[in-house]
Image: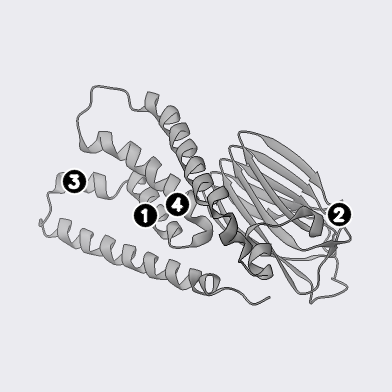
Amino acid sequence: MEPTDEKRNSNPNKKLAFGFIVIIAGLMMLAFNFNIFPWDLKHIFFSWQMLLIAIGVVSISNSESRTPGIILILVGGFFLIPEMFDFHIAFIKLFWPVLLIAIGVMILVKRGIYGPGHTHWHRQRTHCERQQTQPDLDEGFINETNIFSGSKRRITHEVFRGGKVSNIFGGTEIDLSQATLAEGRVELTIECIFGGVTLIVPSDWKVVLSVNSIMGGFSDKRNIVREPSDPSRVLVIRGSSVFGGGEIKSY
């Protein structure tokens, strides 16, 4: 299965966005050092809130981490407002309600984009695209979404072909210990926001991690990693983790 152009370009786009942000940060520092901008504004432009916004901007340049990027921009912007303006209300009391509303809006928007009105468009996709975007568990794929909930899934199919797992304030445990990895490169996309994923895989699987973590982490915690019987079979875990994470284990 050939990777799409979007996947080929995701890393260059991310590096390009990061490069622009570094240049802007350097220009801002010059402006403050030479008194072009008022020194009183430095604590706003060089703050943890602005850091979250910058990380969010870099994240949305990658199609696989746009949702975490948007949330980071919203969180950073939310806490930056009281630093810029004088408000008589406690913004911290608004944080969780506003965050829940924002997540709900994004869920509805996403549902509207991929809702029934686009059924015909979905049918016109190639088989390769359908596997990447809407994995079918009955064919060896998994598509798991948890929002303020959790799930446990045990894959007993003869061949595991990949899929996608999305957790927003939720968690997932996927047991692949009885599965066989499909030939070639198998991709599992992970997207966690204030959530986590636990994968249980055989000790002889070759696993490659490519997860971008922000205030979190994703690691291989298998106590024993045996030499793969077929090195050409590789499980690639891609995606992003924001205020969350995951781990790989084996029995």
> Upstream in the sequence, badge 3 or badge 1?
3
Q: Is residue 136 left or right of residue 22?
A: right
Tag 4 residue: 69
Disc 1 is placed on an element classified as: helix
Q: Measuring 85% from the left and 75% from the top, which residue is drawn there?
A: 230
Q: Could you tell me the amino acid type at mark 3?
A: Leu
Dividing the picture into quadrants, the one containing residue 172 is top right
Task: Name the N-terminal-most of marks 2 and 3.
Answer: 3
- Dot 2 or dot 1, earlier in sequence: 1
User: Viewed as shown, does residue 182 lie left or right of 59?
Assistant: right
Q: Are marks 2 and 3 in contact (CB under 8 Å)?
A: no
- Whole-percent x and y of residue 117? 53, 50
Q: Closer to the camera: disc 2 or disc 3?
A: 2
Residue 83: mark in rendering: none
Image mark count: 4
> What type is the residue that disc 2 sits on?
Ser
Q: Which residue is mark 3?
A: 41
Q: Position of residue 196 (x, y in %)?
A: 64, 44
The residue where tag 1 is placed is: 54
Residue drawn 36% across the image and 50% down it: 53
CB-based contact (under 8 Å), mark 3 and mark 1: no
Q: Quadrant of residue 177?
A: bottom right
Q: Which residue is mark 2?
A: 177
Mark 4 vs 2, N-terminal side: 4
Q: Is residue 1 above or below residue 98?
A: below
Q: Amino acid at mark 4?
A: Gly
Vertical order, 246 against 207 (above or below): above
Disc 4, disc 1: CB below 8 Å?
no
Q: Secondary structure at mark 2?
A: loop
The N terminus: image quadrant = bottom right
Name the one closer to the observer, 80 or 169. 169
